[in-house]
Amino acid sequence: MNLDQMKASKALLGNATVDMLMKVHEDALWMLENVGVGCKQPDMLDVYRQFEADGKAVVYDNRVYITSDLVNECLNKVPGIDRFFVPLNSFFIGGTAPYVYDDSAGVGGVLPTQDHVKRIAQIAETNPVVAGMGRGVKLKDEVSQIDVMVENCTKPLYYAVTSERTLEHAKNIFQQRGKEMIVFCLTRPPLQVNENFSENFVQVVRAGLPVFISAMPMAGISAPYCYNGVLTMTHAEVLFGICTAQLLRPGHTCIHAGFPTIADPRFEYNPNYGLKSHFVLNLLMAHLNMILDLPTFQSGCTTNEEHLTERALADARTGQALCKKYGFHMIRHSFGFLRHLVDFSFAKLEAAIHIAEEVTADEAPDVDMPVYDDRGMESIQRVGLGMYMDDPLTTANIGKVFVE
């Protein structure tokens, strides 16, 4: 626990909102102990079975239940923010769009190439406001994409490892640079290990590469439709990944990349990444993790616009101003993405970088900071591993929260 950060967060967010964040942590611990996480990966199950004798974990029917004592032991082993290689308040070119937006024609759907990756890396390298980069767009060959990134950007990087070939390559790069994070969506909602990546996760942790553990429960679909409800679900999923990493390799560097999202009924319940509420939700996730002294990497400064409109750039300015006002550790999706993170626009990338250079905290819109809503935990206890679209809390809160 970082008491100085606790004090700073209270000054920025208010005592009641920080109290909410502390209850989110307690609720996430309750979920891990009472709801558990579905898992079939043998190495993961084995490390938890070692704690069954002293009652700190239970493995039953391919589900892992973890006590708060064991979670806290694991959290105490994670290297803190002051030992991490990325400083506070760092904007990244991050995320992985399947397509490039044709800025001249005003249409998306262009297949990305190595030249696109090279251009992203060079822009990241030459702009001081950009602290580092993820892939930006996705190429079929992981190794080739990593090589282009490394050759053109000396800043911290994050990327995926989904094969032994890529892992060996990433190990060599990390030995030379030491500024890499390997991204995993280890869980899929609700509270289930994504077995497509679980073996890779175990291998990467045992190889000593920092793991960037993402999770993105969606309020109104796979999580309760209130601030503390979706934060709790997100936090519980990432805590499982952190605990697993610490049991596999104590003291391993873990990044809490919980990415709470919001289903917007106005857009057929698709995620709306342009809401002010989305930016605030992710900043709250960041503050909880900074208080816990966990390196933390959230999402923000994005848009729900399909094209590069004035609104798309206004969304970027709003998100960046909020980030500068309230503070954070690392933010991804900060510059080039359009609706649903599907298309990557170079014109938006360069315009949003310019905005980040000039925008100030004074430009941030007013925010009514949320406080703890008891109905969030009641919703979790009622719905559990089900879907939340028809939950009474969702229907009660539509039009009342997450509306801006």
Image: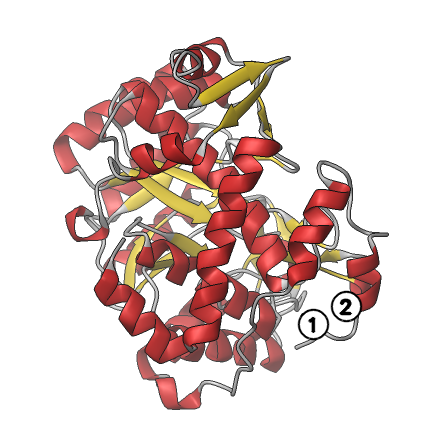
Classify mark 1: residues with Cα within 10 Å, few (<14), some (14-19) or many (20+): some
- Point 52% across, 68% down: residue: 279
Dividing the picture into quadrants, the one containing residue 49 is top left
Lateral position of residue 313 relative to residue 11, left or right: right
- Point 54% across, 15% down: residue: 59
Lateral position of residue 112 relative to residue 325, left or right: right
- Point 43% across, 47% down: residue: 257
The amino acid marked with disc number 1 is Val
Q: Secondary structure at mark 1?
A: loop
Q: Position of residue 261 (x, y in %)?
A: 61, 56
Q: Position of residue 332 (x, y in %)?
A: 42, 56
Question: Which residue position is annotated with label 1?
Answer: 401
Q: Nearer the viewer, residue 346 or 402?
A: 402
Numbered badge on residue 397: 2
The amino acid marked with disc number 2 is Asn
Mark 1 vs 2: CB contact within 8 A: yes
